[in-house]
Image (tube, rainbow, N blue to C red):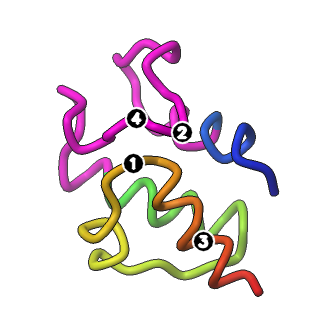
Amino acid sequence: MDIQEFIENFAAQFDETDEALFTADTNFKQLDEWSSLTALSIIAMVDDEYNVIIKGSDIINSETISDLYDVVEKKRS
């Protein structure tokens, strides 16, 4: 898994947000489309794509996509 792949999979969970807004430094909770349903989609995507279970607290404690990527990487090891 690399950060660019993770960003692409993360961005795919959003229907109306321009993909250009998604970078490692994106504060995803500041995106207009962010909601609790999007958070659930992210949790499901991480489980499906990376076989890693993340919790709501992992999302709450992450500010950027890179932060969440780091959480997933740590849980994969």
Mark drawn on residue 24: 2
The span from disc 3 to disc 1 (Cα, nearest Å) is 13 Å
Up-down relation of residue 40 to residue 75 (above or below): above
Q: What residue span does the magenta drawing correspond to?
A: 9-38
Q: Which amino acid does label 3 sit on?
A: Val
Q: Are marks 3 and 1 in contact (CB under 8 Å)?
A: no
Q: What residue type is labelled 2?
A: Ala
Q: Measuring from the top left, give residue 66's x and y in whole percent.
A: 52, 51
Mark drawn on residue 64: 1
> What residue is disc 3 on?
72
The span from disc 2 to disc 4 (Cα, nearest Å) is 6 Å
Q: Are marks 1 and 2 in contact (CB under 8 Å)?
A: yes
The span from disc 1 to disc 2 (Cα, nearest Å) is 7 Å
Q: What residue type is labelled 1?
A: Thr
> Residue 44 colored magenta?
no
Near mark 3 (Cα within 10 A), the count class, few <14, some 14-19 or many ≥20, is many
The span from disc 2 to disc 3 (Cα, nearest Å) is 14 Å
Q: Do the residues labelled 2 and 4 touch (CB within 8 Å)?
A: yes
Most prominent secondary structure in the magenta stretch? loop
The span from disc 4 to disc 1 (Cα, nearest Å) is 5 Å
Q: Do the residues labelled 4 and 1 touch (CB within 8 Å)?
A: yes
Q: Which amino acid does label 4 sit on?
A: Thr
> What residue is disc 4 on?
26
Q: Measuring from the top left, give residue 35's x and y in whole percent.
A: 19, 46
Looking at the rendered structure, the secondary structure element under dot 1 is loop
Near mark 1 (Cα within 10 A), the count class, few <14, some 14-19 or many ≥20, is some
